[in-house]
Image (cartoon, rainbow, N blue to C red):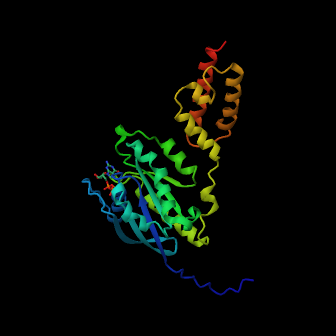
Amino acid sequence: METGAPKRRENKKSLRVKVISLGNAEVGKSCIIKRYCEKRFVPKYLATIGIDYGVTKVQVRDREIKVNIFDMAGHPFFYEVRNEFYKDSQGVLLVYDVGLRESFDALDSWLGEMKQEMGSQANMDSIVFVVCANKVDLTKRRVVDEGEGRLWAESRGFHYFETSAQSGEGINEMFQAFFSSITDMCENGGKRPVSEVSVGFTKEQADTIRRIRNSKDSWDMLGVKPGATREEVNKAYRKLAVLLHPDKCVAPGSEDAFKAVVNARTSLLKNIK
Ligand SMILES: Nc1nc2c(ncn2[C@@H]2O[C@H](COP(=O)(O)OP(=O)(O)OP(=O)(O)O)[C@@H](O)[C@H]2O)c(=O)[nH]1
């Protein structure tokens, strides 16, 4: 029943959160954090020695968030120093350089290192992950495209942002989404809200697109042995077409993968009696 009395606005308690940055050396972790906190870009490379630590305050809706940022050194040499700092993180920035494929391929091993160091405490559902495809300003040297990066991130329920610490592109949007998701998670009893993890496509679709992108020839793309019969090629094609048809699959890169599969089938059938 409405009493007519003015409602007292609840003053929500401030939150204290811990976030860490991960990724190979020189991908731009420190610069991304500096760009956001200090609004500047440092062109000269100064390797992080072990860990850099900083604190910043942000406002998310009606809550003040105190953020403790642990910027981890990417160089393998500092493993012994950074392994102490994985525990109790609510947020992880996973950074790679779009011009260095090995820095993208290394994301899985960064997750692996994190899981290993968190040990039995590892509950990845209680951590918000943001993938930063960094250095997008250097367009000419780009080797990992948006579809590939987004697919890797979103198939794991992670956010994906294209960023440039140099120009500032994507940096504020990325941090706003990051802190807002961490706040949602804390208000949701420490579990990542379900909407964040449901991305509208399956892991099978994501893995298939990745496999197609990395296939060495048309046989490999359709997943059949060289010398397979027309029936085998058609059967494999039909299975992939159902999985990846653009009407059914919204995963990033599905349209290109579907076209590639159609072309692979056409070129194989031309040469099979
Ligand atoms: N063009 C361009 N250069 C960048 C960008 N971000 C970082 N850099 C440069 O890349 C180099 C490495 O940047 P850092 O932020 O120190 O890299 P890091 O990932 O923190 O490296 P470690 O501390 O060794 O782990 C520096 O020379 C930066 O100026 C970017 O978005 N665009």
Among the 4 quarters of the image, the one containing residue 190:
bottom right
Say which residue appears at 58% left-offset and 49% top-offset: 155
Instruction: Pick out the residue farthest to the left.
Output: 44
In the image, is residue 211 above or below residue 152? above
* Nearest the eye: 264 or 195: 264
Q: Is residue 250 visible?
A: no
Q: Report whether residue 21 is seen.
A: yes
Q: Is residue 148 above or below residue 26?
A: above
Residue ranking furthest to the top: 273
Q: Position of residue 261 (x, y in %)?
A: 60, 29
Q: Is residue 50 left or right of residue 150?
A: left
Say which of 199 and 45 sits in front.
45
Which residue shows up at 54% across the image and 82% down it? 11
The furthest residue to the right: 1
Does residue 79 appear to the left or right of 123 in the view shown?
A: left
In the image, residue 80 sits, relative to residue 186, either above or below, namely: above
The total of numbered circles placed on residues is 0
Q: Image quarter for residue 77?
A: bottom left
Image coordinates of residue 92 in percent, x first then y, are 47, 61
Q: Residue 123, relative to residue 94: is it above or below?
A: below
Q: Position of residue 251 (x, y in %)?
A: 60, 43
Q: Where does the image place residue 46, in percent across and percent down from the top left?
A: 26, 57
Q: Nearer the viewer, residue 116 or 271?
A: 116
Give the position of the C terminus as an image quadrant.
top right
Front-most of residues 251 and 109: 109
Quarter of the image with the N terminus in it: bottom right
